[in-house]
């Protein structure tokens, strides 16, 4: 695996400051039942890292202390953490919106047979990876047979009400480009997804999120191996849109790694860039610090990969920033 951080620093990316914290994004661990080419976490079946009980216990306390609106659970496959359901229940009991970043095929893993029903019962918002509506493209990026299992998972979620008007069960899909290119228009691609998935499989969903691939971890290492890392960074920089700076997710979100350390975003987490240190915080800053220190107005750690969130229509965990 090639290291990408040295190629992303120093950077002339504009300075950013935090606004009020509304979203707690928690990485429960790096274990996953898939090993995707574009994965910026380098997750896979052999990863062992997972959040421990004392750190998990801080999550509902921080939600209450900070007035958090949204708990965003990610991984790896977050559902593989043995306490995933307990975390969901505690957050929902506080009235918080909970997002599960789901790879869909997890619904068919041993021990997960009732996962879809659990998510529906707790009214968890599902954000599901589906990088294309064509089987050959999905299987090329995610592994043989992944497309068929993903379609079966979506049909199962639809049967429970997910993606259907009036159900209160939100199902959003995620698209990543196949290679080092900017994603297409989110609204246009969403129309294509909606038409093709319904026509071929009877599948409905709420929104499509298009995300730019980040030049870090597995994807960044692949770019280096192919000699296209500099070209991809140039593409991101040349398409920088200053208007996106006001909406980047790091202004209102904090990313928590499996050890409880704080980062400005999930991408900084994977680069090993902690939240900038300041008086009153541990070093590196930890989830427990949010019980006594406010982040609003604090600086955000930036590097050249940040151009990935601000290129073209912009990119965030919630899809495009501008349409």
Image: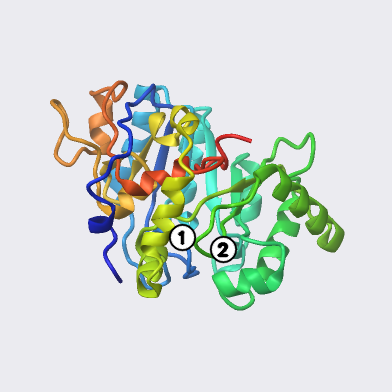
| Secondary element at image label 2 | helix
Where residue 217 appears, x then y in whole percent? Answer: 35, 62
Residue 260 in sight in this render: yes
Outermost residue, bottom side: 144
Outermost residue, right side: 199
Q: Earlier in the sequence, mark 1 or mark 2?
A: 1
Where residue 267 appears, x then y in whole percent? Answer: 37, 49
Residue 257 in sight in this render: no
Q: Find out whether the residues at labels 1 and 2 contact each other: C-beta distance under 8 Å.
A: yes
The residue tagged 1 is 80
Quarter of the image for the N terminus: give it.
Answer: bottom left
Residue 30 lies left or right of residue 110; in this view the side is: left
Please, is residue 309 above or below residue 280 in the view? below
Specify few, some or many for label 2: CA neighbours under 10 Å numbering under 14, 14-19, or 20 or more: many
Q: Quadrant of residue 321?
A: top right
Seen from the viewer's position, the closer of residues 72 and 36 is 36
Seen from the viewer's position, the closer of residues 86 and 204 is 204
Where residue 12 appears, x then y in whole percent? Answer: 28, 40
Quarter of the image for the C terminus: give it.
Answer: top right
Q: Quadrant of residue 14?
A: top left
Q: Residue at x 54, y 42 (%)?
A: 312
Looking at the image, how many numbered discs can be counted on the residues? 2
Q: Residue at x 21, y 36 (%)?
A: 276
Specify few, some or many for label 1: CA neighbours under 10 Å numbering under 14, 14-19, or 20 or more: many
Please, is residue 264 above or below residue 74 in the view? above
Instruction: Name the colour scheme.
Output: rainbow
Please, is residue 31 above or below residue 46 in the view? above
Q: Residue at x 31, y 49 (%)?
A: 269
The residue tagged 2 is 106
| Secondary element at image label 1 | helix
């Amino acid at each position: 695996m090639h290291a990408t951080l040295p190629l992303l620093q120093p950077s002339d990316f504009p300075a950013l400051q935090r606004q009020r914290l509304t979203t707690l994004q928690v990485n429960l661990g790096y274990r996953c039942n898939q090993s995707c080419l574009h994965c910026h976490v380098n997750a896979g079946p052999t990863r062992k890292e997972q959040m421990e009980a004392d750190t998990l216990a801080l999550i509902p306390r921080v939600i209450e202390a900070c007035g958090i609106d949204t708990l965003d659970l990610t991984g790896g496959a977050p559902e593989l953490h043995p306490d995933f359901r307990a975390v969901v229940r505690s957050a929902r009991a506080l009235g918080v919106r909970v997002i599960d970043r789901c790879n869909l095929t997890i619904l068919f893993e041993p021990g997960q047979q009732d996962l879809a029903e659990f998510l529906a019962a707790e009214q968890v918002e599902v954000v599901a990876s589906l990088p294309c509506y064509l089987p050959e493209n999905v299987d090329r990026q995610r592994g043989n047979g992944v497309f068929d299992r993903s379609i079966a998972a979506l049909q199962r979620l639809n049967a429970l009400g997910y993606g259907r008007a009036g159900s209160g069960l939100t199902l959003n899909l995620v698209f990543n480009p196949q290679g080092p290119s900017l994603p297409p228009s989110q609204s246009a691609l969403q129309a294509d997804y909606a038409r093709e998935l319904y026509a071929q499989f009877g599948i409905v969903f709420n929104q499509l999120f298009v995300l730019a691939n980040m030049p870090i971890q597995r994807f960044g290492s692949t770019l280096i191996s192919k000699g296209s890392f500099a070209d991809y960074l140039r593409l991101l920089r040349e398409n920088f849109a200053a208007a996106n700076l006001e909406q980047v997710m790091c202004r209102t979100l904090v990313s928590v790694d499996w050890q409880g350390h704080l980062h400005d975003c999930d991408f900084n987490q994977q680069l090993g860039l902690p939240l900038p240190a300041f008086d009153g915080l541990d070093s590196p800053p930890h989830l427990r610090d949010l019980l006594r220190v406010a982040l609003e107005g604090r600086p955000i750690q930036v590097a050249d990969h940040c151009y990935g969130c601000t290129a073209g229509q912009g990119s965030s965990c919630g899809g495009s920033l501008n349409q």
